[in-house]
Image (spheres, rainbow, N blue to C red):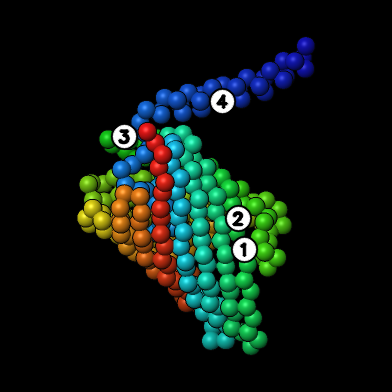
Protein backbone atom coordinates (compact mmCIF):
# COMPACT_ATOMS: atom_id res chain seq x y z
CA UNK A 1 0.00 0.00 0.00
CA UNK A 2 2.83 2.39 0.87
CA UNK A 3 4.45 1.73 -2.52
CA UNK A 4 1.16 2.52 -4.32
CA UNK A 5 0.80 5.78 -2.41
CA UNK A 6 4.38 6.72 -3.32
CA UNK A 7 3.70 6.11 -7.00
CA UNK A 8 0.49 8.16 -6.82
CA UNK A 9 2.32 11.00 -5.09
CA UNK A 10 4.57 11.29 -8.14
CA UNK A 11 1.88 10.72 -10.76
CA UNK A 12 -0.77 13.15 -9.47
CA UNK A 13 1.37 16.34 -9.75
CA UNK A 14 2.49 15.27 -13.24
CA UNK A 15 -1.12 14.63 -14.25
CA UNK A 16 -2.18 18.01 -12.88
CA UNK A 17 0.59 19.74 -14.81
CA UNK A 18 -0.40 17.93 -18.02
CA UNK A 19 -4.07 18.90 -17.61
CA UNK A 20 -3.09 22.50 -16.86
CA UNK A 21 -0.85 22.66 -19.94
CA UNK A 22 -3.52 21.18 -22.20
CA UNK A 23 -6.09 23.57 -20.79
CA UNK A 24 -3.80 26.54 -21.34
CA UNK A 25 -3.16 25.44 -24.93
CA UNK A 26 -6.87 24.97 -25.66
CA UNK A 27 -7.93 28.19 -24.00
CA UNK A 28 -5.58 30.29 -26.12
CA UNK A 29 -6.11 28.63 -29.51
CA UNK A 30 -8.82 31.13 -30.30
CA UNK A 31 -6.38 34.03 -30.10
CA UNK A 32 -4.43 32.78 -33.12
CA UNK A 33 -0.84 33.24 -34.16
CA UNK A 34 -1.13 33.57 -37.91
CA UNK A 35 -0.18 37.01 -39.24
CA UNK A 36 -1.12 38.65 -42.51
CA UNK A 37 2.59 39.18 -43.27
CA UNK A 38 5.40 36.75 -42.61
CA UNK A 39 7.11 36.90 -39.20
CA UNK A 40 10.73 35.79 -39.39
CA UNK A 41 13.52 35.11 -36.91
CA UNK A 42 15.75 36.98 -39.37
CA UNK A 43 17.64 39.25 -39.33
CA UNK A 44 19.46 39.56 -36.00
CA UNK A 45 20.02 37.36 -32.97
CA UNK A 46 16.69 37.99 -31.21
CA UNK A 47 13.61 35.91 -32.03
CA UNK A 48 10.00 36.85 -31.39
CA UNK A 49 7.64 35.14 -28.99
CA UNK A 50 4.99 34.25 -31.61
CA UNK A 51 4.60 30.92 -33.37
CA UNK A 52 3.64 30.50 -37.03
CA UNK A 53 0.07 29.36 -36.49
CA UNK A 54 -1.40 26.08 -37.67
CA UNK A 55 -0.79 24.80 -41.21
CA UNK A 56 2.16 27.05 -42.03
CA UNK A 57 5.62 25.96 -43.21
CA UNK A 58 8.46 28.48 -43.19
CA UNK A 59 12.09 28.51 -44.37
CA UNK A 60 14.62 31.03 -43.02
CA UNK A 61 18.00 30.82 -44.73
CA UNK A 62 21.04 33.06 -44.91
CA UNK A 63 24.76 33.39 -45.51
CA UNK A 64 27.07 34.94 -42.91
CA UNK A 65 30.65 36.09 -43.57
CA UNK A 66 32.63 36.51 -40.35
CA UNK A 67 36.21 37.81 -39.92
CA UNK A 68 37.98 37.26 -36.60
CA UNK A 69 41.39 38.90 -36.00
CA UNK A 70 43.01 37.67 -32.81
CA UNK A 71 46.29 39.39 -33.72
CA UNK A 72 48.40 40.20 -36.77
CA UNK A 73 49.36 36.53 -37.24
CA UNK A 74 46.08 34.84 -36.38
CA UNK A 75 43.06 35.52 -38.58
CA UNK A 76 39.97 33.42 -39.35
CA UNK A 77 37.59 33.92 -42.26
CA UNK A 78 34.33 32.04 -41.78
CA UNK A 79 31.44 31.38 -44.15
CA UNK A 80 28.28 30.09 -42.48
CA UNK A 81 25.17 28.98 -44.36
CA UNK A 82 22.35 28.80 -41.81
CA UNK A 83 18.92 27.30 -42.54
CA UNK A 84 15.94 27.01 -40.17
CA UNK A 85 12.83 24.99 -41.06
CA UNK A 86 9.64 25.71 -39.09
CA UNK A 87 6.25 23.98 -39.14
CA UNK A 88 3.14 25.23 -37.32
CA UNK A 89 1.26 22.25 -35.88
CA UNK A 90 -1.28 24.16 -33.77
CA UNK A 91 -1.94 27.86 -33.30
CA UNK A 92 0.36 27.97 -30.25
CA UNK A 93 2.80 25.16 -31.07
CA UNK A 94 5.45 24.73 -33.74
CA UNK A 95 8.36 22.40 -34.39
CA UNK A 96 11.63 23.39 -36.02
CA UNK A 97 15.00 22.18 -37.25
CA UNK A 98 18.28 23.97 -37.86
CA UNK A 99 21.31 23.03 -39.93
CA UNK A 100 24.55 24.94 -40.54
CA UNK A 101 27.14 24.44 -43.28
CA UNK A 102 30.40 26.10 -42.26
CA UNK A 103 33.79 26.83 -43.83
CA UNK A 104 36.73 28.10 -41.76
CA UNK A 105 39.91 29.48 -43.29
CA UNK A 106 42.48 29.96 -40.53
CA UNK A 107 45.51 32.06 -41.42
CA UNK A 108 48.27 31.28 -38.95
CA UNK A 109 51.91 30.48 -39.77
CA UNK A 110 50.47 27.36 -41.45
CA UNK A 111 47.24 28.09 -43.31
CA UNK A 112 44.45 25.52 -43.00
CA UNK A 113 40.87 25.16 -44.17
CA UNK A 114 37.96 23.01 -43.01
CA UNK A 115 34.40 22.66 -44.29
CA UNK A 116 31.43 20.66 -43.04
CA UNK A 117 28.09 20.53 -41.26
CA UNK A 118 28.73 22.38 -38.01
CA UNK A 119 25.29 22.32 -36.33
CA UNK A 120 22.10 20.25 -36.36
CA UNK A 121 19.17 20.95 -34.04
CA UNK A 122 15.54 19.92 -33.63
CA UNK A 123 13.02 21.39 -31.23
CA UNK A 124 9.73 23.14 -30.55
CA UNK A 125 8.32 26.54 -29.64
CA UNK A 126 5.28 27.37 -27.53
CA UNK A 127 3.59 30.76 -27.26
CA UNK A 128 2.49 31.33 -23.66
CA UNK A 129 0.78 34.71 -23.91
CA UNK A 130 -0.25 36.50 -27.10
CA UNK A 131 -2.49 39.19 -28.56
CA UNK A 132 -2.85 41.22 -25.41
CA UNK A 133 -3.59 44.92 -25.76
CA UNK A 134 -1.06 45.70 -23.05
CA UNK A 135 1.95 43.86 -21.75
CA UNK A 136 4.42 41.63 -23.56
CA UNK A 137 3.90 38.56 -25.70
CA UNK A 138 5.77 35.65 -24.11
CA UNK A 139 7.09 32.37 -25.51
CA UNK A 140 9.63 29.63 -24.92
CA UNK A 141 11.69 27.55 -27.33
CA UNK A 142 13.78 24.44 -26.65
CA UNK A 143 15.99 22.48 -29.03
CA UNK A 144 18.18 19.42 -28.84
CA UNK A 145 21.72 19.95 -30.17
CA UNK A 146 22.38 16.71 -32.03
CA UNK A 147 25.80 15.05 -32.45
CA UNK A 148 25.27 14.87 -36.22
CA UNK A 149 28.03 17.04 -37.65
CA UNK A 150 31.10 16.64 -39.77
CA UNK A 151 34.13 15.28 -37.93
CA UNK A 152 35.79 18.69 -37.50
CA UNK A 153 32.73 20.12 -35.69
CA UNK A 154 31.18 17.06 -34.01
CA UNK A 155 30.03 17.27 -30.38
CA UNK A 156 30.40 14.30 -28.06
CA UNK A 157 26.82 14.03 -26.79
CA UNK A 158 23.41 15.58 -27.28
CA UNK A 159 23.20 19.13 -25.96
CA UNK A 160 20.26 21.42 -25.22
CA UNK A 161 19.40 25.07 -25.69
CA UNK A 162 16.42 26.82 -24.07
CA UNK A 163 15.29 30.39 -24.82
CA UNK A 164 12.61 32.55 -23.20
CA UNK A 165 11.31 35.23 -25.58
CA UNK A 166 9.39 38.46 -25.04
CA UNK A 167 7.89 40.81 -27.66
CA UNK A 168 6.64 44.20 -26.48
CA UNK A 169 4.80 46.54 -28.84
CA UNK A 170 5.68 50.16 -28.05
CA UNK A 171 3.53 51.81 -30.72
CA UNK A 172 2.42 51.15 -34.31
CA UNK A 173 6.00 51.35 -35.59
CA UNK A 174 8.22 50.16 -32.73
CA UNK A 175 8.64 46.68 -31.25
CA UNK A 176 11.07 45.58 -28.52
CA UNK A 177 12.31 41.96 -28.50
CA UNK A 178 14.11 40.45 -25.51
CA UNK A 179 15.62 36.95 -25.24
CA UNK A 180 17.40 35.16 -22.42
CA UNK A 181 18.57 31.58 -22.57
CA UNK A 182 21.02 28.86 -21.69
CA UNK A 183 22.93 26.30 -23.76
CA UNK A 184 24.44 22.97 -22.75
CA UNK A 185 26.81 22.11 -25.61
CA UNK A 186 26.95 18.38 -24.93
CA UNK A 187 30.74 18.31 -24.56
CA UNK A 188 30.83 18.12 -20.79
CA UNK A 189 31.50 21.82 -20.19
CA UNK A 190 29.55 24.26 -18.07
CA UNK A 191 26.33 25.70 -19.56
CA UNK A 192 26.52 29.09 -21.28
CA UNK A 193 23.91 31.75 -20.62
CA UNK A 194 23.11 34.47 -23.15
CA UNK A 195 20.83 37.44 -23.82
CA UNK A 196 19.71 39.74 -26.64
CA UNK A 197 17.72 42.97 -26.82
CA UNK A 198 16.46 44.29 -30.16
CA UNK A 199 14.52 47.41 -31.17
CA UNK A 200 12.61 46.87 -34.43
CA UNK A 201 11.13 49.70 -36.49
CA UNK A 202 8.59 49.48 -39.33
CA UNK A 203 9.27 52.41 -41.67
CA UNK A 204 6.64 51.44 -44.25
CA UNK A 205 4.62 48.44 -45.36
CA UNK A 206 7.74 47.00 -47.03
CA UNK A 207 10.76 48.30 -45.10
CA UNK A 208 11.82 47.61 -41.51
CA UNK A 209 15.06 47.89 -39.55
CA UNK A 210 16.56 46.82 -36.23
CA UNK A 211 19.40 47.66 -33.84
CA UNK A 212 20.46 45.14 -31.24
CA UNK A 213 22.81 44.28 -28.42
CA UNK A 214 23.52 40.70 -27.41
CA UNK A 215 26.13 38.53 -25.74
CA UNK A 216 26.96 36.18 -22.89
CA UNK A 217 25.62 36.61 -19.36
CA UNK A 218 28.06 34.28 -17.59
CA UNK A 219 31.07 36.09 -19.10
CA UNK A 220 29.45 39.54 -19.46
CA UNK A 221 30.03 40.37 -23.10
CA UNK A 222 28.33 42.95 -25.35
CA UNK A 223 28.04 42.72 -29.13
CA UNK A 224 26.18 45.04 -31.49
CA UNK A 225 24.46 44.57 -34.84
CA UNK A 226 21.77 46.10 -37.02
CA UNK A 227 20.17 45.79 -40.40
CA UNK A 228 17.24 46.05 -42.79
CA UNK A 229 14.45 43.79 -44.03
CA UNK A 230 12.35 44.19 -47.17
CA UNK A 231 8.92 42.56 -47.50
CA UNK A 232 8.59 41.45 -51.13
CA UNK A 233 5.08 40.13 -50.52
CA UNK A 234 3.12 38.74 -47.57
CA UNK A 235 5.02 35.42 -47.72
CA UNK A 236 8.55 36.51 -48.76
CA UNK A 237 11.12 38.67 -46.99
CA UNK A 238 14.74 39.64 -47.79
CA UNK A 239 17.24 40.93 -45.21
CA UNK A 240 20.74 42.36 -44.81
CA UNK A 241 22.62 43.03 -41.57
CA UNK A 242 26.10 43.57 -40.12
CA UNK A 243 27.66 43.64 -36.68
CA UNK A 244 30.62 43.60 -34.32
CA UNK A 245 31.15 41.06 -31.57
CA UNK A 246 33.84 40.23 -29.05
CA UNK A 247 35.95 42.53 -26.89
CA UNK A 248 38.63 45.20 -27.32
CA UNK A 249 41.39 42.66 -27.92
CA UNK A 250 39.58 40.91 -30.78
CA UNK A 251 38.46 42.52 -34.03
CA UNK A 252 35.42 40.41 -34.88
CA UNK A 253 32.89 41.61 -37.48
CA UNK A 254 30.36 40.06 -39.84
CA UNK A 255 27.90 40.72 -42.64
CA UNK A 256 24.80 38.63 -43.18
CA UNK A 257 22.19 38.31 -45.97
CA UNK A 258 19.15 36.07 -46.08
CA UNK A 259 15.66 35.18 -47.17
CA UNK A 260 12.52 34.04 -45.36
CA UNK A 261 9.67 32.32 -47.21
CA UNK A 262 6.49 30.61 -46.03
CA UNK A 263 3.85 28.28 -47.46
CA UNK A 264 0.31 28.60 -46.08
CA UNK A 265 -2.49 26.05 -46.53
CA UNK A 266 -5.02 27.38 -44.06
CA UNK A 267 -8.65 27.46 -45.09
Alpha carbons under labels 2 and 3: distance apart: 34 Å
Question: Residue 171 at x, y = what percent?
Answer: 23, 46
How packed is label 2: few (under 14 Cα within 10 Å), some, or many (20 or more)? many
Q: CB of mark 1 within 8 Å of CB of mark 2?
A: yes
Q: Residue at x 56, y 25 (%)?
A: 18
Q: CA distance from mark 1 to mark 4?
A: 37 Å
Position of 262 with respect to 204 (left or right) is right
Q: Residue 9 in the image: state x and y as whole percent.
A: 67, 19
Residue position marked by numbered label 1 in the rendering? 117
On residue 99, the disc is: none
Circle 2 SS class: strand
**4 or 3: tag closer to the N-terminus:** 4
The circle on residue 132 is 3
Judging depth in this view, the residue of 196 and 76 nearest the camera is 76
Alpha carbon separation for disc pair 1 and 2: 8 Å
Instruction: Assess whether mark 3 and mark 2 are in contact (beta carbons under 8 angstroms).
Output: no
Q: Which quadrant holds residue 253?
A: bottom left
Q: Residue at x 57, y 64 (%)?
A: 101
Name the residue tied to disc 4. 18
Tell me the SS state at disc 1.
Answer: strand
Which residue is pictured at 49% across the width and 47% down the height? 86
Tell me: residue 248, above or below residue 191: below
Q: Quadrant of residue 189?
A: bottom right
Q: Which residue is mark 2?
A: 120
Are there few (<14), some (14-19), or many (20+) residues within 10 Å of tag 3? few
Q: Quadrant of the N terminus?
A: top right
Can the viewer see residue 57 in this picture?
Answer: yes
For marks 1 and 3, the one nearer the N-term is 1
Asked if the residue at tag 4 contacts the one at tag 1, i.e. Cβ–Cβ closer than 8 Å, the answer is no
| Mark closer to the chain start, 1 or 4 | 4
Disc 4 vs disc 2: Cβ atoms closer than 8 Å? no
**Sooner in the amino-acid sequence: mark 4 or mark 2:** 4
Amino acid sequence: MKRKLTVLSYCIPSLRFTILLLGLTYSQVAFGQFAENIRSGRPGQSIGAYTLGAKVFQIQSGVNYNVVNLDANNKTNRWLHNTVLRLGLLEKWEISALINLQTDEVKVPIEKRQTGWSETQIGARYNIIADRERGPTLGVQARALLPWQSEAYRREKIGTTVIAMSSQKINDRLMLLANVGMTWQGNGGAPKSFYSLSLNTNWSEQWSSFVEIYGRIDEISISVDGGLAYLVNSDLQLDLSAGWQGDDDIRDWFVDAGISWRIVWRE
